[in-house]
Amino acid sequence: MTRASDTAKLLGAGATILDGTTISTADNTDTLTLTSTDADANSGSNLRLYRNSSSPAQNDLLGNIQWEGRNNNSQDVIYAEMRSQIETTTDGSEDANFKWSTMIGGTLVDRLAVNANATVFNDDSVDVDFRVESNGNANMLFVDGGNDCVGIGNNNPNSFNTLADNLVVGTTSGENGITIATGTSNSGRFVFSDNTTSSNDAFVGAIEYSHGSNNAFFFYCSGTQRMKIDASGNVTNSTGSYGTISDEKLKENISDASSQWNDVKALQVRKYSMKADELDSADKIGVIAQELETSGMNGLVEETEWTDPDDILKKEKIKTVKYSILYMKAIKALQEAMTRIETLESKVTALESA
């Protein structure tokens, strides 16, 4: 402060300075300190930026705080700034915004904008990332600004982006997943949509788990339920039919299958129930994987990982059966049986005619 009159004004309570004032220091001590010694719970100390305009209007700048320094060409540069503007001056409907800006590549750009209708990060659309760090993950939420995709627990979601996926969860190490929690009588679902103008377009496809339907899975296609898996693992579909790719142009090494007579004859068709259902008697029919292996049909058995429904972290290897191949073996054996029957019928007819 350079003028004695300004000093005198500041020494008195409620002093008002009507022109610009500069406070300068030659070291790193605090240049200005606002202190309140009040002991109550009200606000203090207070810094007020007041634009007392006689004709307030939209976009009036209410005040700004700038952090300014020099560059290597001895030029003054505003490296960061906070500012607020009026958006609406109508009595009872006043709106305002508040923006934080920093210098990026020689341009002051908005990094955070709090507007009347939204809170926006990176409103100037520059190539910067947004990252939220948790206690144990440096990239708990990561928005890749340059590649327009989002990672959860992943700071390089674009590396998975061959299908233009907008969201990637987890990395290629450790276990990752998404949990959809609902009420005990409600549903959780993934919905696939291509339009919002009609309910069918907004619900083109979906995968739904319904607690209210006795814990069943539903699969929708073209806006219609196509398949259901009930709590016991039974699969039903809306048409009663199913198919697989069988076009000749996709196949090679085509020849007649060998005899399946002995394999089918060796099958042991069993009645059983699942331990998880805790039933007193059998309610299902099928084969046992280990018995198929004993019969020499190892090719119909494979191992997969089974998750304990009571403890999802507990996993073990279990055996599954390729029933689709088993059915084809049965058809081949049936054809063989039909041929034998027809041969016998011909012989019986010949004997009866003799």
Image: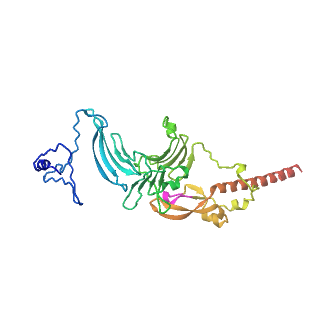
181 to the left or right of 320: left
Q: Choose between 20 and 64: the one closer to the eye.
A: 20
Assess whether residue 274 is covered by the magenta stretch. Answer: yes
Q: Nearer the viewer, residue 306 or 342?
A: 306
Residue 13 appears in the picture as rendered: yes
| Residue 54, image quadrant | top left
Residue 17 falls within the magenta-colored stretch: no
Relative image position of residue 298 (x, y in whole percent): 65, 64
- In front of the other: 20 or 336: 20
Q: Position of residue 132 (x, y in %)?
A: 38, 55
> Where residue 354 sits in the image (x, y, percent)?
89, 51
Q: Position of residue 47 (x, y in %)?
A: 21, 48
Taking the image as shown, residue 179 lies to the left or right of residue 233, namely left
Q: Residue furthest left?
A: 12
Number of marks present in the image shown? 0
Residue at the outermost right position: 354
Residue 278 visible (yes or no): no
Q: Which color scheme does this rendered protein use?
A: rainbow
Q: Quadrant of residue 115?
A: top left
Secondary structure mostly seen in the magenta stretch? loop
- Magenta range is 272-281
Q: Name the residue at 69% across, 59% down.
A: 264
Query: What residue is shown at x 37% (from left), y 58% (from top)?
Result: 134
Going 70% across and 48% down the picture, which residue do you hit?
247
Does 343 sit left or right of 119 as displayed?
right
| Residue 144 vertical position relative to residue 135 in the rendered view, above or below | above
